[in-house]
Image: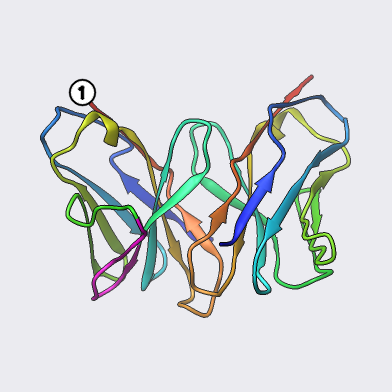
Amino acid sequence: GDSVTQMEGPVTLSEEAFLTINCTYTATGYPSLFWYVQYPGEGLQLLLKATKADDKGSNKGFEATYRKETTSFHLEKGSVQVSDSAVYFCALSDRTGTALIFGKGTTLSVSS
Amino acid sequence: GAVVSQHPSRVICKSGTSVKIECRSLDFQATTMFWYRQFPKQSLMLMATSNEGSKATYEQGVEKDKFLINHASLTLSTLTVTSAHPEDSSFYICSALKGGPSTDTQYFGPGTRLTVL
């Protein structure tokens, strides 16, 4: 079945460092891809998404490009802030209106 | 925006009792809601899909008689954990689809931490 694999954390960075969190997926069709963020004590929030190959999702300085040839959707940010400290989940949806399949989550800790 | 609430945020109960968790979409109607379970340092695992006015669809391995789901209105779905046991202790999260089945953006509640003693 469909699945999502993302790099294990925790990822520890200094403020203003470059961030990459790897995410690869396995799917039989053409899924939509998502990054969700979970701040401490809060629910999951949609960070960005891409619905077809070569689409780039972006929000709050974060970016991810849907790469069909490598089945990847890596999350990047050029300069992280302390406030970016959270757990990041990569996810896919193989059909509209269906539940998401999540990766295990990557904890990011940014220090000043 | 789209806001989904859950109540309670935390609950502690004795083994053998039942616990009801509510999931509400506050500013939109949701014909479809999902219930997930999250174990520590693990991913979210889908338990069931809740459709307004019809029976929920459960994932393989999820006991439908133990995890009762009711989606009686377009803004409310409930999950009742019946005869709870310590192994049911977990973080339960709901989500709601805004815009109907043609959309693929889910909005998540903040989760409910269940501890069964």
Q: Is residue A87 left or right of residue B54?
A: right
Q: Nearer the viewer, residue A110 or B114?
A: B114
Label 1 is found on which chain of the structure? B
Q: Secondary structure at mark 1?
A: loop
Residue A5 position within the rendered picture, expressed as x and y whole percent measured from the top left: 67, 47
Residue where numbered disc 1 is placed: B117
Residue A67 position within the rendered picture, expressed as x and y whole percent measured from the top left: 82, 63
Q: Is residue B12 left or right of residue B83?
A: right
The amino acid beneath tag 1 is Leu
Above/below status of A35 relative to A84 = below
The image quadrant that residue A88 belongs to is top right
Quadrant position of the N terminus of chain A in the picture: bottom right
Identity of the residue drawn at 69% across and 44% down = A6
Residue B95 position within the rendered picture, expressed as x and y whole percent measured from the top left: 43, 57
Identity of the residue drawn at 69% across and 27% down = A10
Identity of the residue drawn at 65% across and 69% down = A31
Q: Is residue B51 magenta?
A: yes
Colour scheme employed for the rendering of this structure = rainbow
Q: Nearer the viewer, residue A112 or B77?
A: B77
Name, please, the residue furthest toward the bottom: B102
Circle 1 Cα neighbour tier, 10 Å, few/some/many (<14 / 14–19 / ≥20)? some
Residue B32 position within the rendered picture, expressed as x and y whole percent measured from the top left: 38, 70
Q: Is residue A43 left or right of residue B19?
A: right
Q: Give the residues in magenta.
A: B49-60
Q: Is residue B96 magenta?
A: no
Identity of the residue drawn at 64% across and 71% down = A28
The image quadrant that residue B116 belongs to is top left
Quadrant position of the C terminus of chain A in the picture: top right
